[in-house]
């Protein structure tokens, strides 16, 4: 099975965002990955809803929105209004994760739970049946272009085993430091979807890079 490719526009050229989004529209990528940061949960701030309202209008692919913010449930209506298909919230940002997952479903979006590099896969045991997808962070969230954390491959294997053992149908997505080399190992370990920022937008031919990642 070919991996789903979700280009992260955090690494796009913000001076020519429309041009980069048109490239993604033309490409083989299935989704578009949007990183929202608050400067509290992560040490950086990306784009807010007023900007995203325009960005998402240009986007023709389903939106895979990754919220790196505290209290993500506060923004369910705003995230929905962007036309989001998948709303990713962090395990570490949601003390009442089960409730947040239900709220995302009630709003008509697919719930995904994201775990940081230091959060073990085993903590997902009691939520795995309720989520559309788990996003494994393979860097500490906050910035594009960071070095891949090797242990993430093992976490994908563990998550695959948890999914099989529990009969869950959750997809496995990985985000951070994904390129052709790390991507191939992640897919072999069981990843269904790959987020890539720098590998795509830093490539001489981003569309061809998407094709190559898709062929892993
Ligand atoms: C990091 C973000 C990622 C980031 C990935 O906090 O969640 O989506 O854009 O960028 P690369 O692929 O460059 O590591
Ligand atoms: Zn992300």
Image (tube, rainbow, N blue to C red):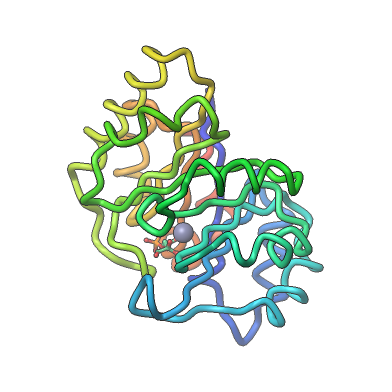
Q: Residue at x 35, y 55 (%)?
A: 92
Q: Nearer the viewer, residue 139 or 130?
A: 130
Q: Residue at x 40, y 59 (%)?
A: 93
Q: Is residue 63 above or below residue 10?
A: above
Q: Nearer the viewer, residue 123 or 95?
A: 95
Could you tell me how many numbered marks the image carries?
A: 0
**Seen in the image, is 203 located left or right of residue 156?**
right
The reply to whether residue 205 is in sight is no
Q: Position of residue 151 (x, y in %)?
A: 18, 42
Q: Is residue 11 above or below residue 159?
A: below
Q: Residue at x 58, y 59 (%)?
A: 73
**Seen in the image, is 13 located left or right of residue 181?**
right
The reply to whether residue 215 is in sight is yes
Q: Nearer the viewer, residue 88 or 15?
A: 88
**Seen in the image, is 158 located left or right of residue 6?**
left
Q: Position of residue 101 (x, y in %)?
A: 57, 43
**Seen in the image, is 68 located left or right of residue 84?**
left
- Residue 123: which quarter of the image? top left
Point out the image quarter for the C terminus: top left
Q: Nearer the viewer, residue 85 or 92?
A: 92
Q: Residue at x 79, y 67 (%)?
A: 58
The extreme bottom residue here reads 15
Q: Position of residue 44 (x, y in %)?
A: 39, 80
Q: Is residue 187 above or below residue 81?
A: above
Q: Is residue 187 above or below residue 161?
A: below
Q: Position of residue 199 (x, y in %)?
A: 42, 59
């Amino acid at each position: 099975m070919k991996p789903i490719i979700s280009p992260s526009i955090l690494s796009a050229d913000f001076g020519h965002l429309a041009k980069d989004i048109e490239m993604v529209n033309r490409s083989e990528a299935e989704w578009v990955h949007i990183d929202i940061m608050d400067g509290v949960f992560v040490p950086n701030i990306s784009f807010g809803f007023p900007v995203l309202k325009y960005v998402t209008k240009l986007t023709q692919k389903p939106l895979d929105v990754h919220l790196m913010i505290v209290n993500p449930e506060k923004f369910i209506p705003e995230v929905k209004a962007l036309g989001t298909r998948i709303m990713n919230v962090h395990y570490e940002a949601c003390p009442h994760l089960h409730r947040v997952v239900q709220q995302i479903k009630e709003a008509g979006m697919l719930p995904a739970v994201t775990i940081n590099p230091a959060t073990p896969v085993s903590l997902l045991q009691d939520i795995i049946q309720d989520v559309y997808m788990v996003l494994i962070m393979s860097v500490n969230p906050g910035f594009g272009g960071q070095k891949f954390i090797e242990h993430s491959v093992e976490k994908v294997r563990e998550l695959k085993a948890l999914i099989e053992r529990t009969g869950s149908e959750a997809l496995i997505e990985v985000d951070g430091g994904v390129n052709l080399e790390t991507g191939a190992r992640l897919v072999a370990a069981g990843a269904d979807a790959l987020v890539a920022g720098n590998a795509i937008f830093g490539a001489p031919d981003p569309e061809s890079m998407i094709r190559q990642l898709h062929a892993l």
